[in-house]
Structures are given as C-alpha cells and as structure tokens.
Image (cartoon, grey):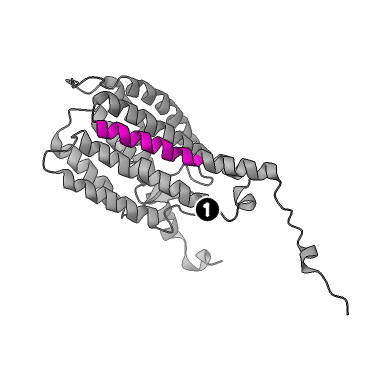
Amino acid sequence: MIEIDERSTDRTPYPSPWRRFLAWGVHFYTALGLVAAAGIAVLIVSGHPESFRSAFLLMAVATIIDATDGTLARAVRIKEVLPGFDGRRLDDLVDFLTYTFLPLLLIWRAGLLPEGQEPWLLLPLLASAYGFCQVEAKTEDGYFLGFPSFWNLVAFYLYALQPLPGWLSLGIVIGLAMLTFVPTRYLYPTQKGGALNGWTNGLGAAWAVLMVYVMWDLPRTGEKEKSPPLLAILSLYFPIYYMVASWWVSLHIGHRRAATPADEALP
C-alpha cells in the first residue's frame, strides 16, 4: 500500500517575504488612523479654535486613509497573505474613533449644542455602536444600510456654519442618529455595484477640494463668525445630494423588489 503525503497535495504557495511585508505595510497604513485619532483627541481637549481647525484637518487625513486602504488591501490580496490578522476589525476600530467618538467629543467640547442638551450626544454614540455591529451594515449590492456614521461631517458643519439655532443643531443630531435604525440604503461610492457611483465620486472630488478651502478659513481665534461663511454654505451641495440620492436609490430598489413576483425572485 502506497502512502500519500497529504502535504504534497497542497499547491497553495506560501506567501513570499516581500508579499508579507507589503501586506503588513497596508495594515500599518490603516493603523495610522489611530495615530491621527490620538492627535485629534489631544487637539479637542485643548479646546482652542485653532485646535479645532487642526482636529478637522486630521479627521480629513483619517478619512483619506480609510478611503484608500481597502484598495491597497485588495491589490496585495491581503486576506490570502495574512489570513490570521483581521484588518476589518482594525478598520472598524479606527472608524469608530474618527467617524463617531471623537467628532461627538468635539461637538461637546466646542459647545455646539444648546447648554444643558449635551447628554443627547449619547444617542448618536449608541446608535453608531448599533450600526457598526450590524452584520449587514454594508450590503452585498454595494450600499450602507442605515445612516452611516458620518459624524465627522456633522461636527464639521455644525462648527463651520455657526451660529446655528440651537434647536436646529439638536434636531440634526437626534434626527440623523435615529436614521441609523432605519434600514434604508446609503451610497457607498468606493464599493462596486452601487448606483450613481460615477456621479457621486465626481461630485465628491469637487466637494473635497472646496472643503479644503473651508477648513483653511475656519476661525483661528476666539472670535466667532457673525454669519456662516459662503463657501461652507456652498459646500452643502454634496451632503444634500448624498442624502437625496440615497433615499431615491432606497425607494427605487424597494419599488423594484415589490414589483418582482415572488416566484421570479427565487433562484
């Protein structure tokens, strides 16, 4: 009887040291978001307008890292090279800090809600924890399910558009937090398969350039703007487009599924 060495049937090549180096480099690149988060926390605690401005710039850096690390991970086939390290968990850890916890901390520290209403910030904090833990937070057809935790943008606009009526600021925070629990689709333009990705990426690129100018002109002293800056108001075109387009896509998909007979929906 001939014995077969089972190891000889495994044709999966062991990743080369160079591929492993590249894979760990991508994980390190993702982890740089934690470095940005540490800097953001220090700046927020200092509580000066110049520090808030720098904190928003670091949030933008963290967003760029988050938007590009997935492409790098797919390029090096990171799951094949380092199957024992879950980069998605690292990414979620960084995202919760830079998209939710720290922006909400900034809203509190900068006094952007009416006095005495700060405990309402616990609502988006808990809502985001719920959203991050949902198995279908990112759908198979290329969308977010429920309002994505873009609290960095919420904090930015509440700060940049000062002075806003207190009831409006509070209403925005509560309303968006509640939308986290509503299972509607939101555009995820860096994922394949989603509708309007081309339009969204194009409009988003122009918006990102405009945002750089808005951030650069944020107050650097203790003096507040007497009226919201014009560029900040103009830059609202993209958040408005994003919300309206997302709701339109949700309605369109809902109507299409409702119109599809049950027997045709079966594989």
Residue 265 vertical position relative to residue 209 in the rendered view, above or below: below
Work out whether residue 182 or residue 161 is closer to the camera in this orientation and state it. Answer: 161
Query: Residue drawn 37% across and 46% down?
Result: 96
Describe the element under mark 1 as helix, strand or loop: loop
Quarter of the picture holding the C terminus: bottom right
Q: Looking at the picture, how far across and down is residue 139, in whole percent?
A: 46, 54
Q: Looking at the picture, how far across and down is residue 202, in whole percent?
A: 47, 30
Q: Single out the residue that lies furthest toward the bottom.
A: 1
Query: Residue drawn 51% across and 44% down?
Result: 191
Residue 212 falls in image quadrant = top left
Q: Is residue 226 left or right of 188 when viewed as pictured? A: left
Work out whether residue 165 or residue 96 is closer to the camera in this orientation and state it. Answer: 96
Residue 225 falls in image quadrant = top left
Magenta stretch bounds: 30-47
Membership of 36 in magenta stretch: yes
Reading the image, the residue beneath label 1 is 86
Residue 216 vertical position relative to residue 114 in the rendered view, above or below: above
Residue 149 falls in image quadrant = top left
Q: Single out the residue that lies furthest toward the left.
A: 116
Q: In the rendered structure, which amino acid carries the disc numbered 1?
A: Asp
Residue 82 vertical position relative to residue 108 in the rendered view, above or below: below
Q: Residues within 10 Å of mark 1 (few under 14, many from 20)?
A: few
Residue 168 visible (yes or no): yes
Q: Looking at the picture, how far across and down is residue 260, in whole percent?
A: 46, 61
Quarter of the picture holding the N terminus: bottom right
Q: Looking at the picture, how far across and down is residue 229, in whole percent?
A: 25, 21
Membership of 224 in magenta stretch: no
Residue 248 visible (yes or no): no
Q: Main secondary structure of the magenta part?
A: helix
Residue 195 vertical position relative to residue 134 in the rendered view, above or below: above
Q: How many marks?
A: 1
